[in-house]
Amino acid sequence: MERLTSPPRLMIVSDLDHTMVDHHDPENLSLLRFNSLWEHAYRHDSLLVFSTGRSPTLYKELRKEKPLLTPDITIMSVGTEITYGNSMVPDHGWVEALNNKWDLGIVKQEASNFPELKLQAETEQRPHKVSFYVEKSKAQEVTKELSQRFLKRGLDVKIIYSGGMDLDILPQGAGKGQALAYLLKKLKTEGKLPVNTLACGDSGNDAELFSIPDVYGVMVSNAQEELLKWHAENAKDNPKVIHAKERCAGGIIQAIGHFKLGPNLSPRDVSDFLEIKAENVNPGHEVVKFFLFYERWRRGEVENSEAYTASLKASVHPGGVFVHPSGTEKSLRDTIDELRKYHGDKQGKKFRVWADQVLATDTTPGTWIVKLDKWEQDGDERRCCTTTVKFTSKEGEGLVWEHVQQTWSKETMVKDDSSWII
Ligand code: GLC
Ligand code: MG
């Protein structure tokens, strides 16, 4: 959050499973659409927050499986664990607050009296979250009886039913909504209260997000019955909450447009983006656009025409250099020529490219340094390169690529890097 010097323009607080991530879309198209929209239009001045029921263990697994961006803030285990930044630094202050009228031992002991409750995996049992599976038909009754028992034992807990199967027991002060309220308060004291906040969810544990004041909300089209029921009973007349027509991340993009929170056209929805000239100089946008072009080029989704190569060549400095992750240096012009050979080589294959954490700095006037993580999914292999691009801008001429340098990221160990082109 330190990178922001003023209040974020937009803070998106999104659930992951069946909201940001569509488990019924093996191509991850709506997620990739969201990613390029976020990186080209929001990353530099906004905050991305993931709020998931998953424990840190399962959250990390999901990140390996799906092309998720790196959020600024990660809220896990149904609002009981908050971490910041890339390195996921925990918020100890939040954990302290959760100990009030909470006793893990008593919760487990009382719950063990209910044979209807089946304990979830060990990884999902957390210091302030005890989780079970329970059949839909029994959920209401069990919740009622459990609450009474906890009350008798002097505990103040919250029981949440999600996805028609998961039952979580948390301290009363926990949950996704309380965690968001805490975050907003914290940002406010730092003078960084977001101009707009959009909460996104699909199931029972997301309901709380939609009752935080001054927050816009979107229930994605595929929202669960329990969330729609909660909405009908509690928030029907709130014009700040919509039930989207589109599934998952598509619904999030729809809500950005509906509430007029900023740009809502994903670069992935533009077919001939090389023709688009951005109104203002935006080097981050340039990079997102290029890597998307690169994906389409190799998938054979753009025409193999001289016009493209010529336009690319026109945007690079004649003496521009590309440093391959292997250390080899080539001129940028030669790299573009080489690209010709690869047109359509990934046609019909699982090949996707996306940019994460695109951040630009302008240290000297007219010069921009853009840093990003460039990801490539190639069949079942996924690789990441930390990429640095130096741009120069000349009055009236737009941006010129001067230098591109790539190094393998820590997460990517590559034995043979010959198939990595740019
Ligand atoms: C995630 C968690 C699980 C929890 C569920 C609903 O699936 O892994 O423990 O019960 O979210 O909150
Ligand atoms: Mg969900």
Image (cartoon, helix red, strand yellow):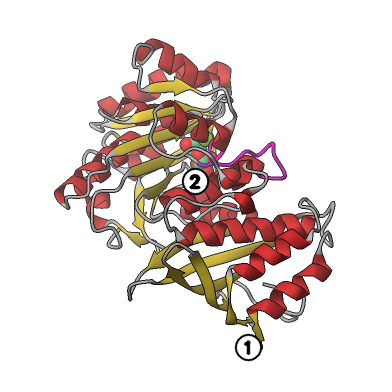
The answer to whether residue 304 is left or right of residue 194 is: right
Q: Residue furthest bottom?
A: 328
Q: Position of residue 34 (x, y in %)?
A: 54, 44
Q: Is residue 241 above or below residue 126?
A: above
**Image location of residue 15, percent across then percent down:** 47, 39
Residue 327's label in the rendered image is 1
**Disc 2 within 8 angstroms of ligand 1 (CB):** yes
Q: Mark 2 belongs to which amino acid?
A: Arg
Judged from the image, the secondary structure of the residue bearing numbered disc 2 is loop
Q: Return the residue nearer the eye: 302 or 251.
A: 302
Of the residues shown, which amino acid type is indicated by label 1?
A: Gly
* Residue at screen point 33% across, 59% down: 90
Q: Which residues are magenta?
A: 16-28
Quadrant location of the N terminus? bottom left
Q: Which mark is residue 236?
A: none
Q: Earlier in the sequence, mark 1 or mark 2?
A: 2
Q: Is residue 96 magenta?
A: no
> Where residue 65 sits: x, y (%)?
64, 54
Residue projecting furthest to the front: 396
Spatial CA distance of label 1 from label 2 is: 39 Å
